[in-house]
Image (cartoon, rainbow, N blue to C red):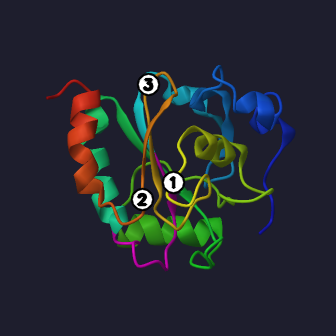
Amino acid sequence: MESHLTSDMFKGTMDEQAGTGTTFHDFRARTIDGVEQDLSEYRGRLVLVVNTASECTFTPQLTALQELQDRFGEHGFTVLGFPSDQFRQEPGTDEEIKELCTSTYEVTFPLFSKVDVNGPGAHPLWQWMCTQKAGVIGGRIAWNFTKFLIDGEGRVLRRYAPPVPPARIARRIETELGLR
């Protein structure tokens, strides 16, 4: 996979990123339209970060993720989709991915440029999130549609395995947003 990493996507080294002072808001990522975005723009919002793929058994979760966005967006919640081809299930270009997500699944939540989520070429955000909440196989992302819930201060609250349907996360979102 072509790396889109630049030195300005994070501040400091990964060792510093793993420290307690680093938050989600310290990172940058390229949107699916090619624009560099500071993730600090999501400060104060509850965010669900998901690695997506268009040819995965879990791809229909895009509909349920959009339902969460529709239900909770006006209350301070945002889904962020990060396509990845590390499991050989996202062969398309950013343009093709955007077209599929918006036309087939009616996705309106923000999508980012395709990234690696594991290994030395992994986007720094994904490296950091994996250090904050390890999964069943340690820090690595096991499969597409791994989800990280990030609070308004940029801390990782919870990691959800790929089979966890987005609807099962709704109660936690309600609680975090003070809607319960």
Q: Nearer the viewer, mark 3 or mark 2?
A: 2
Up the image or down, 146 lies above or below 48; here it is: below
> Considering the numbered disc 3 on the image, is that residue within a helix, a strand or a loop?
loop
Assign a secondary structure to mark 1. Answer: loop
**Which residue matches tag 1?**
135
- Magenta range is 49-60
Contact, mark 1 vs mark 2 (Cβ under 8 Å): yes
Q: Amino acid at mark 2?
A: Ala
Q: Please name the amino acid that badge 3 sits on.
A: Gly
Answer above or below: position of 14 versus 163: above
Would residue 18 be visible to someone looking at this image?
A: yes
| Residue at horizontal 63 percent and vertical 65 percent from the top | 94
Residue 59 at x, y = what percent?
41, 72
Q: Describe residue 20's horizontal placement relative to residue 47 as left or right.
A: right
Q: Is 134 left, or right, of 8 in this rendering? A: left
Disc sitting over residue 161 in the figure: 2
Find residue 166 and report its horizontal and vertical position in percent.
Answer: 30, 55
Identify which residue, 8 or 147, lies in the foreground.
147
The image shows residue 151, relative to residue 107, as above or below, that is above
Looking at the image, the residue that sits furthest to the left is: 180
Structural distance between the alpha carbons of marks 3 and 1: 22 Å
Principal secondary structure, stretch drawn in magenta = loop
Q: Residues within 10 Å of mark 3 (few under 14, many from 20)?
A: many
Residue labelled with disc 3? 152
* Disc 3 versus disc 1: nearer the observer: 1
Task: Kindly identify the residue that appears in the image at 62 percent across and 57 percent down.
Answer: 140
Q: Between disc 3 and disc 2, whose residue precedes?
A: 3
In magenta stretch: residue 51 = yes
The circle drawn on residue 126 is none
First reached walking from the N terminus: tag 3 or tag 1:
1
- Please state the horizontal and vertical placement of residue 49, each as a whole percent of the image: 48, 47
